Image (cartoon, helix red, strand yellow):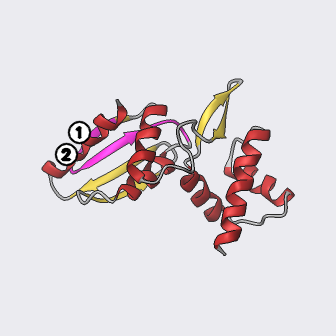
Amino acid sequence: MEVIKQLRQREIRDLLTQRPIRTQQELAAALRERGFRATQATISRDVAELGLVKASQDGVLTYVVPARVTEAESTGEERLRALLHDLPVDVREAGLMLVLRTLPGSAHAIAAALDRTRWSEVIGSIAGDDTVFVAFSDRVSMQRIRGRLAGLRK
């Protein structure tokens, strides 16, 4: 099964270099044209694992692989650094959570990279389309991670 996943993800990267794809539904249809069947959940996981984000191409938001996010990156922190450098991200506090706002279609990639860091201070994260909620058990942990995120953005 892992081989199929690798082939599908390679096909996704190839598709994105050949034509603009605006939605996960368009991506699923394009994959079907090439003989790959995938559920919406599978496509969503692939988008996050590949670090795909949406960028404006001729005034239309389409999926792209960020230039700094490559398969060679080995850690979540490296991927998170690349995403935070390439994307506008607003970080705010809300209780014992950090709320990260970014471009539509980019939150899953940020949350996946954050999860890959395995930072002990992070209790968990939830990603929507353009927002990531990161939960903490105390303010000290939250402030520590906010500082790390600020450092990675530089």
Q: Quadrant of residue 40?
A: bottom right
Residue at (15% x, 49% y) in the render: 139
Q: Residues within 10 Å of mark 1 (few under 14, many from 20)?
A: few
Q: Position of residue 6 (x, y in %)?
A: 67, 63
Q: Amino acid at mark 1?
A: Gly
Seen from this angle, which residue lies furthest front?
Answer: 72
Q: Residues within 10 Å of mark 2 (few under 14, many from 20)?
A: few
Quick one: 38 or 153, which is closer to the camera? 153
Rounded to the nearest angstrom, the CA distance separating label 1 from label 2 is: 5 Å
Does 134 sit left or right of 81 as displayed? left
**Secondary structure under the numbered disc 1 in the rendered image:** helix
Quick one: 56 or 3, which is closer to the camera? 3
**Residue stretch rendered in magenta on the structure:** 91-104
Residue at (41% x, 58% y) in the render: 116
Main secondary-structure element of the magenta-colored stretch: strand
Q: Position of residue 129 (x, y in %)?
A: 52, 46
Residue 50's disc number: none
Residue 125 vertical placement versus 18 (above, below): below
Residue 129 vertical placement versus 122 (above, below): above
Seen from this angle, which residue lies furthest bottom?
Answer: 1
Residue at (57% x, 38% y) in the render: 66
Label 2: which residue? Answer: 144
Is the Cβ of the residue at disc 1 closer than 8 Å to that at disc 2?
yes
- Quadrant including the C terminus: top left
Residue at (86% x, 57% y) in the render: 33
Q: Position of residue 80 (x, y in %)?
A: 42, 45
Label 1: which residue? Answer: 147
